[in-house]
Amino acid sequence: MESDYYWIGLKAVPGVGNVTFRRLLERFETPEAALAQKPAALRTVKGVTEGICDQISAGTWRGYAEQEYGRLQQQQARLVTYTSEEYPKSLFEIPDPPPFLYVLGKLGNTIPAIAVVGSRRATSYGIMTAKRLSESLAMAGVTIVSGGARGIDTAAHSGALAGGGTTIAVLGCGIDKVYPPENRHLFQQISSSGCLISECPFGTMPLAENFPRRNRIISGLSRGVLVVEAAEKSGSLITAQFALEQGRDVFAVPGSIHSVASRGCNRLIKSGAKLVDCVEDILEELPQRATSAATTGEPSPPAPRFSLSPREATLYELLARSPLHIDDIITQTELTAAEVSSMLLHLELKGAIISLPGTHYAIS
């Protein structure tokens, strides 16, 4: 889509992070309109600096946007923006949701989804367990989310594919980069039945600093996180921590007390994570649609799909964190009472939110 060019362009402006990006769209409705504004109008948006105004006015973003838009078409990938009906609404519950995702494949129904994560240096026990549990979950209609890395991630994706299910790989690099290189064929299989996604631009290398941010998306897409093997200090535990902060369930597979690879999982269990030794331990914690699918063989009902205007997305993101009284919604936005009331009504009609007693609102 031609509008992708402007989404890429606005994000490419130095100083425009995810929060400033969303504020600009709240004010000007589209990236194209934001990039066409004069400095005086841009300065009225909180977080917009003189440097950002200068960069937008100079149009230095255009060259990069043209190149990135060309790569998008060459890779047969697409952008899924946070206003799109395809954007996973559970990502509004995470800190700093990305304004858009690069997607290669089909980002279909992600409810219910379980993240399966663990050590890159997994033992044969860990690989066998991750694959078996992922296969059983996939056969029960659960989408498997992982990070495409060596070890447990690879076993999780492979198990989901073996179970005839859907799997999503959230990458810590550009979706045009195959990392690890031995997973090239696996990534092709994933993009055929599920998808590869990343918030990183094309060409981004798999640098260590990208992965902690990637992990918040893995947990954000999922109803819960299953840790199969993890050392005491590992990225898998970061993902589990994100899950706890986002109100997700955390599951862990126990391991030998003599194995370094199991110390992280065993500590999670001591801290309150649910011990898993069979797939039923996970399925019984999922919404009814997942457990009924496991017993009847019928597919899970699709998740609600709706598009959002940038201002509606602001309200939806607030309510995704917790139900709020209408007065609190007005206080936490720059919108008038009339605008908030109108948008709440539109969101209700879309099935995005529900009204509660006492003029409180919550996501549906």
Image (spheres, rainbow, N blue to C red):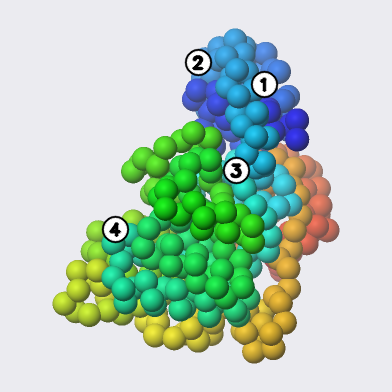
Q: Is residue 344 above or below residue 69?
A: below
> Given the image, on which type of amino acid does mark 3 rest?
Tyr
First reached walking from the N terminus: tag 2 or tag 4: 2
> Residue 15 at x, y = what percent?
49, 25
Q: Going by the image, does 62 lie left or right of 203?
A: right
Q: Nearer the viewer, mark 3 or mark 1?
A: 3
Q: Nearer the viewer, mark 4 or mark 1?
A: 4
First reached walking from the N terminus: tag 1 or tag 2: 1
First reached walking from the N terminus: tag 3 or tag 2: 2
Mark 1 near mark 2, Cβ–Cβ under 8 Å? no
Q: Which residue is mark 4?
A: 234
Tell me the number on the disc at residue 51: 2
Q: CA distance from mark 1 to mark 2?
A: 14 Å
Residue with the most extreme bottom position: 295
Q: Going by the image, does 252 lie left or right of 350?
A: left
Q: Which residue is mark 1?
A: 35
Q: What element does badge 4 sit on?
A: loop
Q: CA distance from mark 3 to mark 1?
A: 21 Å
> Residue 212 at x, y = what percent?
38, 49
Q: CA distance from mark 3 to mark 2?
A: 27 Å
